[in-house]
Amino acid sequence: MRRESGRRTLTTVAAEAGVSVSTVSKVLNGRTDVAPCTRERIGRLLRGYGYQVAPGMQFGVVDLLIGSLHGPWAEELIRGAVDAAREAGQSIVVTTVSGPAEFTPWLERAARRGTDGVLSVLYLPDAGERGRLSGARIPLVVIDPPTEPGSDIRSVGTTNWQGGMAAARHLAELGHRRIAAIGGPERFWSANARLDGYRTALLRGRIPVDEALVSRGEFTAADGRHQAHRLLDRPGPPTAIVAGNDNQALGVLQALGERGLRAPGDVSVVGFDDVIAAWATPPLTTVRQPLAAMTAAGFRMLRAGAASSRIEPQHVELATRMVVRDSTAAPGDVNPGPGCTESRSPRK
């Protein structure tokens, strides 16, 4: 912050406010670790003397709404938000919310205690819920939106289309032509984008898209196993399978084992997420999704909005990366040895 010549020094402002110079400096720079009443009093003095005071956030707390607290996927999202908040001198309150029945009581509690904003993972509040958030002056950023967000919603996602394309292209470059895909539920924007990327890669590789080799299921190992058995029962079974996430890919490996098959010698397998892929047997080739970076970016988006009188709606996508491990090889081959290589997913 700048101070024109002739304006009072921070020492003088601190003396008039009855606080330390460091406290005045915190308010001047938008820090949140000052009591609200003290921050308001110092802010009035500073503005009266011509200082430009950073708005900052008022409560020092941001809410993170997530459907489940269990598993590495959730842990990575929570870690990203907590680390970003710690750097800003704030705290994260985590609440399990996956639908309107859980959203309404959370909003009532948050409005009573106060919050600087909400990061909502995989839950896009409807128009009525967004109106209630606006009325309570609670800004919203959606993380990994389940459906395509409107122009009035700020959100952070990942390059799902590019990731799906990178996975299928990797298999095509290895020489596979019977490449199957197990997608996630149709209700998820990300699942549809990954399948669209898969189809694009096959078309660009001059490989006909056989819709009989495309199936869908929940993002679970059980559904991955079930869909893999269905695909392998076909007269012309696939030599490679792209799964919608790592859980589905683990189910595919289980199905292969139940049939006396193995990856990659019989069927190559690719996952998506890279939160448990390295622990699989064999270690999974997968598309790494920057989960922690997504919530960190969402937190910074909230913070930037608090420091601006005009908030521009926006959707930000962070890049995925292809991570090649031991579950993929040329048809009929085995991987030459352990290891892991990475490459950034292609851009549109």
Image (cartoon, helix red, strand yellow):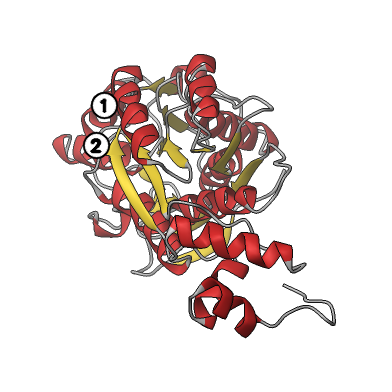
Other residues around mark 2 within 10 Å, as few (<14) / some (14–19) / many (≥20): many
Q: Is residue 32 visible?
A: yes
Q: Is residue 150 left or right of residue 88?
A: right
Image quadrant holding the N terminus, namely: bottom right
Going 39% across and 44% down the picture, which residue do you hit?
63
At x 56%, y 80%, the residue is 15
Q: Quadrant of the C terminus?
A: top right
Q: Secondary structure at mark 1?
A: helix
Q: Position of residue 29 (x, y in %)?
A: 61, 69
The front one of 220 and 141 is 141
* Crowd class of label 1 (few under 14; some 14 to 19; many from 20; radius 10 Å): many
Look at label 1 and name its amino acid. Answer: Asp
Picture coordinates of residue 326, whole percent (x, y): 35, 59
Instruction: Work out whether residue 106 or residue 340 is closer to the camera in this orientation and state it.
Output: 106
From the viewer's perspective, tell me whether residue 142 is left or right of residue 344: left
* Residue 200 numbered mark, or none: none
Report the residue marked by disc 1: 223
Quarter of the image where one finds residue 251: top left
Q: Are marks 1 and 2 in contact (CB under 8 Å)?
A: yes
Residue 289 showing in the rendered view: no
Q: Which residue is mark 2?
A: 251
Residue placed at 59% from the left, 29% from the top?
Answer: 196
Residues under labels 1 and 2: Cα distance? 7 Å
